[in-house]
Structure formats: structure tokens, C-alpha cells
Amino acid sequence: MNTNSTIAAIATPPGIGAIAVIRINGPLAISICEKVFRSAKKAKRLAEQLPYTIHFGSITDRDKIIDQVLVSLFKAPNSYTGDDLVEISCHGSPYIQQRILELLIQNGAEMAQPGEFTLRAFLNGKIDLSQAEAVADLIASTGEASRRVAMNQIRGGFSSKLKELRDQLLHFISLVELELDFSEEDVEFANRNDLANLLKEIRLVIEGLIHSFRLGNVIKTGIPVAIVGKPNVGKSTLLNKLLNEERAIVSEIAGTTRDTIEDTISIGGVVFRFVDTAGIRHTTDTIESLGIERTYAKISQSLVVILLIDAREDEASIINHINEVALKLTSDQRLVVLLNKADLVDPDVINKFIQIISIKYQKSNTLSISAKHNQGISLLKNLLFEITNLGKTSSDEVIVTNARHYNSLARALDGILLVEEGLQTNLTGDLLAVDIRQVLYYLGEITGEITTDHILGSIFSKFCIGK
């Protein structure tokens, strides 16, 4: 990749809109734009204008006006990429956008590759690699929680934590390697007790970051919620009420839902991925049996399991059904029991069931609802938001959301454990230094202090072209 070239791309989504933005970046960005831009004030030259200014005029092809536009100037080194950067705001006609882009390319610009603008920001030291990845996460965020985590990483919350750890380790490894220069004099510059304390502190931080990945992954992709229960108990009706649309087919015929149906909604800024599953029952129908197998698979993959029960059933049947599902859950999963069709049952009976379930299954939450009449749906949404606890994540809390970061942290942790083991067995300084350098390598891999073209290609190829 030639980072000295001047690139151009459409930065707004494809299709018709009121406004579109075309970006030009590189050493010739301003001069190329001047070739096609005619200012409303004819004597004005873009190269002579101050940065962070906006100029009105027209994009022209010789004497033919293509569109009236606004041109925004950002000059090196104080731009997003660190290079000269020009943004042309034009009308959102797909034809106009393509015509302007063609004119820029005809006058010396090259078509940008996916993520090339942000890649240049990274290569020019404007952001590190984890911040660059957070840009993509911010663009893809679908709720307040994922937006908040991505913004924290863009501001450098994750990077500053890793930099602090690396700086402390670098200080110690320099002392350890200094000892090697005086090996014949048997001196010790790096206090082993201080190193042991530092390693313990770093290990606890890395373990905390690794542990946060499960939460971070859920924030990023949405909380998986499985709606399970017997056939014809109202699962599809509940899904439709939660989504506020007729997403699933509702029928009086048992076994109508034979495969899983998925959709998402945002509750309090947190995205939930609801899955309506096939009814759980014993059946000889081959297709329905496959659907039930998938139901159990979705239960194992979900963070929250909503068990829908017909409130008209007797106590023994209700308890048996809860047992059947509860036994399949892990300690990390939350069970929500919903007594549906509560409008058809005496309230005293409902309250009795809720009390029995609450005592017998203390880690579960129980509500009475009527999905058909939209009763209790708001309470259910509030309950889901509360039990996931994601709305309370601090804007300054460092949470790992990226699988690449998780893998590097896991390898760094393995390295820390090796260094700790080496300290306990009185390993020589040169061998300790090797293990510490491995830890530094994996921490540096996250922020891009240590990277390869393969890693960069993999990361930035997933970006949209105009970013």
C-alpha cells in the first residue's frame, strides 16, 4: 500500500439521501479538489484557506456544473488521518456522488480501500490499533451500552491501561537486562520481590480484562434470550408483543413453530436477541423433533432463558416443567419464569404459584403475564434490563469486546504465569527476560506497537470503504 498516494471515497451509505459526503485524503487532497471545485467567490483558492473552514461553491466538469457543494478543509497534521483531508458535502443523488468521485480519480486521486482512512490514522500515530478497531465497533453499535464501551476505547481507556502495564514491565526488563551486562560482578538491579508484586498486580488486571470479555461480547453482539415452553403456551405471541410486530406465526395448532425465529430489540440502550423456539414435548414428528433439538441448543447458548408456562396448569406440572429446563442451565444463565394467560386464573392462585417458585428456585425471577392482552410485557422488559445489569456499566469501565484482544491477553497471561514460576524457581535473569519479552509482545500486539501486514489487512478489510 502506498501511503503517500491521495485517496478518495464516498463516506456515506449507498442510496438516495439528502446529503452525501465524499472524502479525499493525502498530500494532493487540496490541489485535486481545487481542480474540480469553483468557489462562489471566484478569487478564493482552497490551498490559501485556514484549516477547519467550510467553503461554498460548485463541483464542475470543465464548464458544466455537476452540483453545488460545501467543502470542509482539515490540514495535516491536525486531521483525523494526520494528512491533508477534504470532505465534499453534496446532494445525495447516487449519480452525483459517483460523478464527483470519478472527477476526483480523473484528476489524480486513487480509490480508497476498505478502512484505508483509519489505517492511515493508525500509521500516522493519530490512534493505536485498539482505538482503530473501536471506530469500527462504534459504527456497528446498536445500543447505548455498545456505543458507550466503543467510545471509551476510542478515547483510549483500554490503550492507557495496557500502556501502563507495558511501561512497568519495560522498566523491570531494562533492569534485568542491565544485570546481564554486569553478570561477572553478581549484582541485582531488579529487586525480585518488587518484580513478584508487580507481576501479581499485572496478572490480576489481565485476568479482570479477560473475564470482562464475556460481558463485552454480549454488549457488542446483543444479549441472547431464549423463549421456551410447551407447544401452544404463547411463545410466538410473546415474541410478537416484545418486538411490537407480527414476527412469528400464531396458531391454535400445537407445534406451529418448528424452527427458531430470531429478532432484536433495544431495552434501555441494551440490545437483546430474542429467539422463539419450537415447543418442548414428546413427538414422533421428525421435523418437529429437529426443532425441539434446536430449542435445547438455543437454551445452552442463551444468557437468559424465559420459560413460558400456562398458568392454568396444576402445581405439579409447573414444577416438573421448571425442573426440566432448570437442570439444563449453568450458573451463569438466568431463568425467568412467566405464568402466561394469568387473566384466566384467580389472582390468589397466581400469587401462590409465584411464592412457591420463588422459594424453590431462588435464582429465578417469576412474573405473571397475559401475552395476548399485552399485560406484564413492560414489567418483563424492565426485569430483563435489571437482571443483565448492563445499563450500569460505567463510561470509564474498561471492557474487552474484541476476540483478537482476548486471545492476546490470554497469551500474555500465560507468559506472566511463566515469569512467576521462573521467579519461584530462581530462574536466571536472561531466561526471565525472554519470558517478560513474550508478555510485552502480546500486550503490544493489541495496541499495534507490534504488528504485521497480515493483522492489519485482516482488521481493516472489515471496515466500510469511506472510513
Image: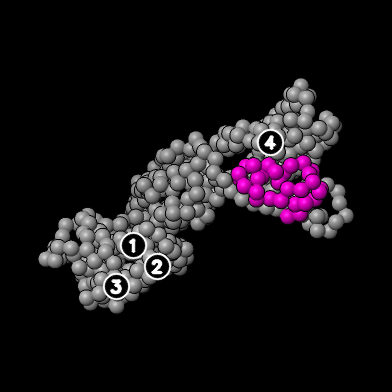
In terms of depth relative to the viewer, which is nearer, 443 or 91?
Answer: 91
Identity, as a three-letter code, of the amino acid under mark 1 = His
Residue visible at 84% across and 31% down? 314
In terms of depth relative to the viewer, which is nearer, 108 or 16?
Answer: 16
Magenta part of the chain: 230-259
Question: Which residue is tagged 1?
Answer: 91
Q: Position of residue 267 (x, y in %)?
A: 55, 40
Question: Which residue is tagged 4?
Answer: 373
Point out the tag, 3 or 2, that comes first from the N-terminus.
Answer: 2
Q: Secondary structure at mark 3?
A: helix
Residue 161 can be seen, yes or no: no
Q: Residue furthest front?
A: 64
Which quadrant would residue 347 be assigned to in this image?
top right
Residue visible at 76% across and 21% down? 348
Q: CA distance from mark 3 to mark 4?
A: 59 Å
Check whether the beta carbons of the residues at disc 4 and disc 2 lie within 8 A of each other.
no
Q: Determine the main secondary structure of the stretch shown in magenta.
A: loop
In terms of depth relative to the viewer, which is nearer, 412 or 134?
Answer: 134
Marks counted in the figure total 4
Q: Which mark is residue 94?
A: 2
Residue visible at 80% across and 38% down? 321
Q: Secondary structure at mark 4?
A: loop
